[in-house]
Image (tube, grey):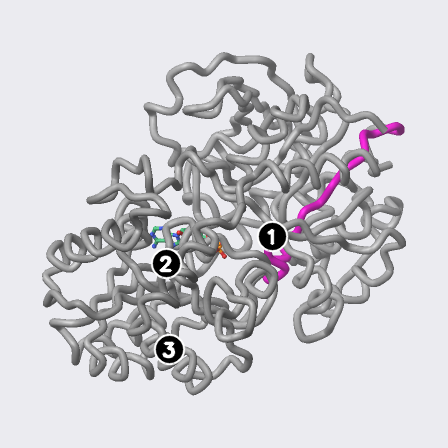
């Protein structure tokens, strides 16, 4: 099939609304596809949290009425461009569903799960009704994660000859599960009469990600290793057999990063710009500036950083046992992230004994993250599982050597420099503090071998994780979707 027009439907798109790596992918891949003559456009909800300065050029494109629990909900579709790009952006407005609660109602412990479920079932249902009305018709719909995974099922309920669909699983941990009767009540359908909705997960719930896996024309994920892992019970989180039964299998395409936004040679947010040839000097200047900014004692030793969500997935709880080894070797540690309050508190407590040498910053701060990538010698990413991971890709682009666990996209993108033939970081096996400690102590040793360090940094910076390669892989995937 020739694919010219693709509609991305997602819950996040950078720079408009970003919670995690999903936003980076949705924000960047359409632009890379444009270079391959694909007109890729984006459709997300018009959240109340989108900053006003991003909403100045909106034009109303169409209105529609959606049946919901027996009520008529009117929705409006606006069109604009994704800020800083010429990618066309559609925003679906339905204030009752999108005005409050951030993106995922993450701060509403009591009702957040139900509200998020209702929000994204509504969004997917409304999108399925709106697609046939668009003046510009997509050849294919590209859905992302559980939030939009029901669209293939919903589209097939509405249109006899619906477009092919691709579902990309960015993280199988989020599935969108709810009682079937509630969902059927919202949609005002008799579930038993609708074959695309006949699936239930192991807990008997209607599971939006499962619906996507069962109904999408093509399913893929964001690295080849994660594509294998999620076929097993250890990583598939109950959906392994649904995935295993797909006749076309599940492929993996590693994400890219935006090489314009993440470019140490042109990055206005960092203290000193540098490229692969000037990295040694440039990184020392950035390190000195960052330590001063954070009021940490200066040092000629290595700087270890981590940037990411503070959750069980990311394995940040494995880091504290390595702190005293790093500090004793004259190293420094800076950790940036937010997430589960218990993990945030545990990390803060572990760092507290080292006020002059280690710092944890609990917030989301993209600019500080960039200054950290630029300053770091090593980037810690001890994830228990990692579908792709962007942190390690950005780190390599900035010449910080990743220290990663051997899983998912980390396995596919970081090569161990302790093996013969060179490498770009350090890779360790078991998800234990001891295994990380061993990798860290090797990193401390390697830091004192300037030639090894320089060569590894050069190799890391020479890697190509731009979007152009992945975009070509996606185009091949689209072409095979039926
Ligand atoms: P995730 O599982 O959260 O999607 P990824 O590694 O794929 O993890 O992507 C995370 C992205 O968000 C990276 O670009 C990372 O630098 C950024 N990020 C995560 N947490 C923070 C934070 N607290 N401040 C700034 N940037 C962050």
Q: Secondary structure at mark 3?
A: helix
Q: Is residue 410 above or below residue 125?
A: below
Q: Which residue is mark 1?
A: 170
Q: Residues within 10 Å of mark 2 (few under 14, many from 20)?
A: many
Q: Quadrant of residue 70?
A: top right
Q: 394 or 207, which is in the foreground?
A: 394
Determine the CA span between mark 3 and mark 1.
Answer: 28 Å
Front one among 381 and 134: 381
**Which of the image's four quarters has the C terminus?**
top right
Q: Is mark 1 within 8 Å of ligand 1?
A: yes
Residue lying at the far front of the rendered structure: 451
**Helix, strand or loop status at disc 1:** loop
Q: Is residue 58 above or below residue 178?
A: above
Disc nearer the start of the sequence (2/1): 1
Callout 2–callout 1 Cβ contact below 8 Å:
no
Task: Tell me the residue at 81%/30% (across/down).
Answer: 163
Q: Residue at x 59, y 65 (%)?
A: 411
Residue 105 visible? The answer is no
Highlighted magenta segment, given as a residue range: 160-176
Marks 2/1: CA–CA distance: 24 Å
For the N terminus, the image quarter is top right
**Pick the front one: 189 or 229:** 229
Choose mark 3 or mark 1, whichever is in front: 3
For residue 271: magenta?
no
Residue 337 percent location from the top left of the image? 33, 59
Query: Label 3 belongs to which residue?
Result: 440
């Amino acid at each position: 099939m020739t694919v010219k027009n693709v509609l991305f439907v997602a819950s996040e798109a950078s720079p408009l609304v970003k919670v995690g790596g999903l936003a980076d992918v949705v924000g960047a891949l359409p632009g890379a596809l444009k270079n391959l003559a694909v007109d890729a456009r984006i459709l997300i909800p018009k959240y109340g949290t989108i900053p006003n300065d991003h909403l100045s050029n909106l034009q109303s494109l169409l209105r529609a009425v959606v049946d919901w629990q027996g009520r008529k909900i009117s929705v409006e579709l606006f069109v604009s461009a994704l800020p800083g790009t010429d990618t066309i952006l559609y925003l679906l407005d339905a204030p009752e569903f999108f005005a409050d609660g951030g993106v995922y109602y993450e701060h509403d412990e009591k009702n957040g799960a139900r509200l998020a479920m209702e929000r994204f079932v509504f969004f997917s249902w409304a999108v399925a009704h709106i697609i046939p009305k668009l003046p510009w018709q997509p050849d294919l719909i590209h859905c992302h994660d559980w939030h939009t995974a029901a669209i293939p099922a919903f589209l097939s309920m509405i249109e006899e000859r619906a477009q092919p669909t691709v579902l990309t699983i960015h993280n199988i941990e989020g599935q969108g599960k709810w009682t079937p009767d509630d969902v059927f009540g919202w949609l005002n359908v008799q579930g038993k009469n609708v074959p695309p909705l006949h699936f239930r997960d192991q807990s008997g719930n209607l599971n939006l990600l499962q619906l996507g896996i069962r109904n999408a024309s093509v399913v893929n994920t964001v690295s080849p290793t994660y594509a294998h892992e999620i076929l097993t019970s250890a990583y598939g989180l109950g959906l392994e057999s649904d995935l295993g039964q797909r006749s076309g299998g599940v492929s993996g395409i590693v994400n890219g990063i935006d090489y314009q936004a993440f470019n140490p040679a042109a990055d206005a947010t960092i203290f000193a710009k540098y490229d692969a040839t000037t990295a040694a000097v440039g990184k020392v200047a950035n390190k000195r500036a960052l330590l001063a900014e954070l009021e940490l004692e200066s040092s000629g030793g290595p700087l270890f950083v981590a940037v990411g969500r503070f959750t069980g997935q990311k394995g940040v709880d494995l880091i504290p046992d390595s702190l005293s080894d790093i500090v004793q070797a004259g190293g420094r540690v800076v950790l940036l992230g937010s997430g589960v309050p218990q993990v945030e508190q545990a990390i803060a407590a572990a760092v507290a004994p080292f006020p002059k040498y280690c710092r944890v910053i609990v917030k989301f701060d993209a600019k500080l993250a960039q200054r950290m990538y630029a300053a770091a010698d090593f980037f810690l990413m001890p994830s228990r599982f990692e579908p792709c991971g962007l942190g390690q890709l950005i780190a390599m682009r900035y010449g910080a050597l990743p220290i990663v666990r051997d899983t998912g996209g980390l396995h596919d993108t970081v090569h161990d420099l302790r093996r013969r033939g060179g490498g770009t970081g350090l890779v360790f096996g078991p998800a234990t503090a001891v295994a990380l400690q061993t990798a860290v102590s090797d990193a401390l040793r390697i830091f004192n071998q300037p030639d090894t360090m320089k060569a590894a940094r050069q190799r890391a910076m020479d890697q190509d994780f731009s979007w152009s390669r992945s975009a070509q892989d996606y185009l091949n995937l689209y072409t095979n979707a039926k």
